[in-house]
Amino acid sequence: MKSTLPVCRTIKLETGEFMKSSIWNFWADKYDRLWVQKYSLRPTRNYILKALSEIKAIDNIKVLDLGCGPGQLINEMSKKFSNLEITGIDFSEKMLEVSKSKNPQARHIKLDADELYKLKDTFNVIICTHSLPYYKEPERVMKEICRLLKDDGRVFMGFASGDSFYDKFILSFVKLTTGPANYPSDKKFRKLVSSYFQVEKLNIIKEKSFMPRIAVYTLNKAVS
Ligand SMILES: C[S@@+](CC[C@H](N)C(=O)[O-])C[C@H]1O[C@@H](n2cnc3c(N)ncnc32)[C@H](O)[C@@H]1O
């Protein structure tokens, strides 16, 4: 039977950035229907929406959704809150196309997270869900997120956490559909952010016992 997945052999023939983003281009128009929506991606979005509603209301909250994918969260945030000015960033052209069609009111930028230094704005809230594991240089991304965040801003960073042997085992299968990924454990993540942020809160999402745990961290700027 012929598989519709981009097989590893094909991926190896491609190179560099194109190879990485092409996997996500492949998933863009199927993403809303993936089974992980139910137990992983949607619960993460629901948590972010709840966390946002607890942020002190100001007239215009500038939000960056880094690795926004097909823009489901942007869409739900826009419907729930009227005071957000949202920017979505992704390096996959197709993901951005889908997001733009759903969210014409949002600003979209095609950019690799490893090139955030090109961005000059600052944000009240930076969200990054299920995208960090795919960054080539996560430490550099953290440094840039810190620069882009206003002093009293918040970062919400969520990802499947390779914390236990079971999680790592399951996530090794997930990697077959996404390409190279590094799912940080709690210890590794805290070390990664320690120079820039303090961890204000950690929320664990585990809807089903067979799913790897999803960690969503609320970060604020470390006081130097
Ligand atoms: C698993 S999807 C998550 C999408 C969305 N944030 C969500 O929670 O459903 C990962 C997204 O990160 C994007 N991504 C991966 N590596 C990236 C990079 N280096 N720079 C920008 N976007 C990246 C992919 O294109 C994809 O849209």
Image (cartoon, rainbow, N blue to C red):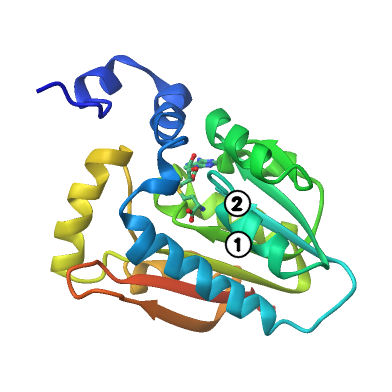
Is 120 left, or right, of 2 in this rendering? right
Residue named by callout 1: 127
Q: Amino acid at mark 2?
A: Leu
Residue at the (68%, 80%) spot, across then down? 53
Distance from mark 1 CB to nearest ligand 1 atom below 8 Å:
yes
| Residue found at x 57% / y 43% | 113
The amino acid at mark 1 is Ile
Where residue 36 appears, as percent x and y from the top left, is 33, 56
With respect to residue 203, does 164 lie above or below? above
| Residue 148 circle label | none
Examine the image and state in which quarter residue 154 appears: bottom right
Position of 26 compared to 83: left or right? left
Q: CA distance from mark 2 to mark 1?
A: 6 Å
Q: Nearer the viewer, residue 116 or 22?
A: 22
Find numbered disc 1 in the image and state the secondary structure of the residue it sits on: strand
**Beta carbon at label 2 within 8 Å of ligand 1:** yes
**Residue 120 location in percent, x, y?**
81, 46
Q: Is residue 161 left or right of residue 168?
A: right
* Mark before the other along the chain sequence, 2 or 1: 2
Asked if marks 2 and 1 touch (Cβ < 8 Å), the reply is: yes
When the figure is inspected, residue 109 is found, relative to residue 39, above or below; the finding is above
Kindly give the residue lying farthest to the left in the view shown: 1
Numbered mark located on residue 66 in the image: 2
Closer to us: 141 or 78:
78
Residue 28 left/right relative to 103: left
Query: Residue 186 in the image: x percent, y percent?
Result: 35, 73
